[in-house]
Amino acid sequence: CNHGKVEDNNGSSVEKPIEYTREEIMKDFRNILKSKNEPVILVEFINENIDEVEKEDAIEMIRALESVQIEYMEKYTDEMFVEDYQTELIGLWDSNSEGSLFLDIEKLEEIQNENLKELLEKLEIGKYKLIALEGVFYPIIDYEALKKYNKYLDDETKGYLDIKALESNEPSIIDAGIYNSLDELANRLIKVEEYIKNYPESIKREELLRLYSSYLKLYLNGSDNSPIYNYEDNIILEDVLNSYKRTAKNQDSITGEIVGRYIEIIEENNNIIDDNVLSKITECHNKAIAELEGNK
C-alpha cells in the first residue's frame, strides 16, 4: 500500500493509506512497457509490485520482461564494445574467473571506468549476465535469476524458465564443441520434449521446437570440435554409442524412439559413420520434429 499525507482537523499531516489496486499496478506496468523502458526499470517496478497482483498478472510481467530483455540485447552488446571496455573486463576475468565461462558481475567495485560500471549495474539489475566467448564478453539473459519469481508463476512458465536456465547456466555448445556431456544434451532433449507435450498450446511452443531441433541435430551429428566418431577409422566413439543406448531406453519418448532407430542404422553399417549414416540424420530428425509437432 502507498501512503499519502492528508491534513487532519488540527492542521497536522497524518499518513493515510491510498489503495494501489491490481488494475492500477498493471496499467502502470503497461505504460512503462509502452514507453520503451529498459529492463532495469521493469525489474524495479516488478520487484516493488509483484506481491500485490494475481498470478496471471505476474506471468504477464515476467513474459513482458523477457521480451524487453531480448529487445535490448543488441543495444547492450553494442555498448560492450565501446572504448576499451573489453580490455578492462578481460583483465578482471583473468584475475578472478579463470576457467569460468562467466564474469562475476559482483566484482564491479574493481572496475575503474564509471560508464562501464554503470552499464554492468544496469545489466545485473536487469537480469543479464556476461559470458566469455572466444575471449570476448557478451550479455545474455540470466534465466536462473528470473527463477526468483517462480513462487508467483504457474507450472508452464516455471517449466519454460527451467529449460532456458539450463542453457544460460551451461550453453550446450561453445567454440564449436559440445560444452556439457552428451548425456546432459539427451536430458535436455527429453525435458524439452516433455514440455512441448505437456503444454501443446504454450506461446513458447515454436521457440522450444526450434531448441529441440538444434539439440537433436547436435546430439545425432556431433560438432566440429566434438565429433561422434574416430577420425582415423570412422568408427563411432564408444562413449557416444553408450550415451545413445542410454537415451534409447526412454521407450515412451519420441527422442528415445528416434535415437533407437539411429542406433540400428549405425549398427547395420558396422558402427562406421560415413555418408550412408550421416545422410539418414535428416530423416531421423525430421521424423522426430513431425511427431512432436503433431502432438497437439
Image (cartoon, grey):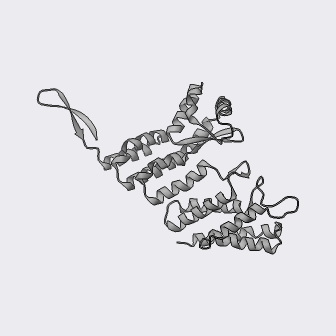
> Looking at the picture, how far across and down is residue 103, in whole percent?
62, 37
Left or right of 103 on screen, residue 262? right
Note whether 108 is above or below 173 in the view shown: above
Check the picture and name the quadrant holding the N terminus: top left
Question: Image point 44% across, 45% down: which residue?
Answer: 33
Q: How many marks?
A: 0
Is residue 38 at least partly visible in the picture?
no
Along the horizontal axis of the image, is 214 left or right of 122? Answer: right
Left or right of 25 on screen, residue 137: right
Residue 255, picture quadrant: bottom right
Residue 82: percent from the left, percent from the top? 64, 32
The residue most toward the right is 232
Q: Residue at x 38, y 47 (%)?
A: 50
Outermost left residue: 9
* Residue 258 visible, this orientation: yes
- Camera-nearest residue between 21 and 221: 221
Q: Position of residue 138 (x, y in %)?
A: 63, 41
Q: Which residue is drawn at the image coordinates 57% and 35% (left, top)?
A: 105
Tell me the residue at 54%/48% (across/down).
143
Q: Nearer the viewer, residue 44 or 183?
A: 183
Quick check: 111 above or below 126? above
